[in-house]
Amino acid sequence: MSGAPLPQGFWLWPEDQTWAQPLPDGQVRIGITALGLKASGEIYMCRPKPVGSDVEQGRSIGVVELSKSIVAVKSPLSGVVTRVNEALEERPELVHQAPYEAGWLVELAPSRLDAEKPRLVIDETAIREAMDRWAWLNQLDAAS
């Protein structure tokens, strides 16, 4: 697993190491960064909020069960959950194996994109700097 920057076109919510990927239909796909996963450890269960749930930026979009705790995953944007990654029910390891592809958590119809987008890190250089800083603060090696 790498702590490398997000793939191009992804946006970072640096405080909680979650990402948002704008989709062509106006929806936004959400997941956890590889760096955030490195800090949390192995995920044994992933329970996103169900379709139709209202979510607020910085608030829980679901929970993950780790070896010694259950942790809320914070959403990078507000909106309504329109789709849940059902594959995670049977294969929660996808979150670790492919955090930016098959390991996504939910899709949202964003409700306050114009107001909230400025709080996300979008520029590739700024994303790298934010991830390096987060790794340093959390005593992780961002490059590994």
Image: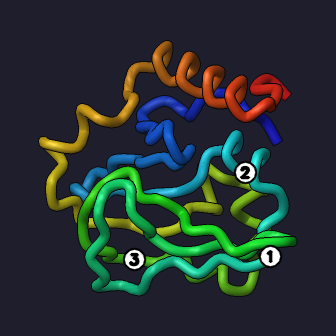
Q: Which-is-in-front pick, marks 3 and 1?
A: 1
Colouring convention used in this rendered image of the protein: rainbow
Amino acid identity at mark 1: Tyr
SS for callout 1: strand
According to the image, label 3 marks what residue? Answer: 83
Q: CA distance from mark 3 to mark 1?
A: 21 Å
Quadrant showing the N terminus: top right
Q: Which mark is residue 37?
A: 2
Residue 108 on image: x %, y %: 32, 66
Which of pointers 3 and 1 lies earlier in the amino acid sequence?
1
Q: Residue furthest top?
A: 125
Which of pointers 2 and 3 lies earlier in the amino acid sequence?
2
Q: Which mark is residue 44?
A: 1
Residue visible at 26% across and 76% down in the picture: 54
Residue visible at 72% across and 34% down in the picture: 138
- Is residue 6 rendered to the left or right of residue 19? right
- Is residue 127 rendered to the left or right of residue 35? left
SS for callout 3: strand
Task: Assess disc 1: are there few (<14), some (14-19) or many (≥20) residues with their C-alpha within 10 Å of its C-alpha.
Answer: some
Residue visible at 76% across and 46% down in the picture: 39
Depth check, front residue: 78 or 136? 136
Quadrant showing the C terminus: top right
> How many numbered tags mark residues here?
3
Amino acid identity at mark 2: Leu
Amino acid identity at mark 3: Arg
Q: Which-is-in-front pick, marks 2 and 3?
A: 2
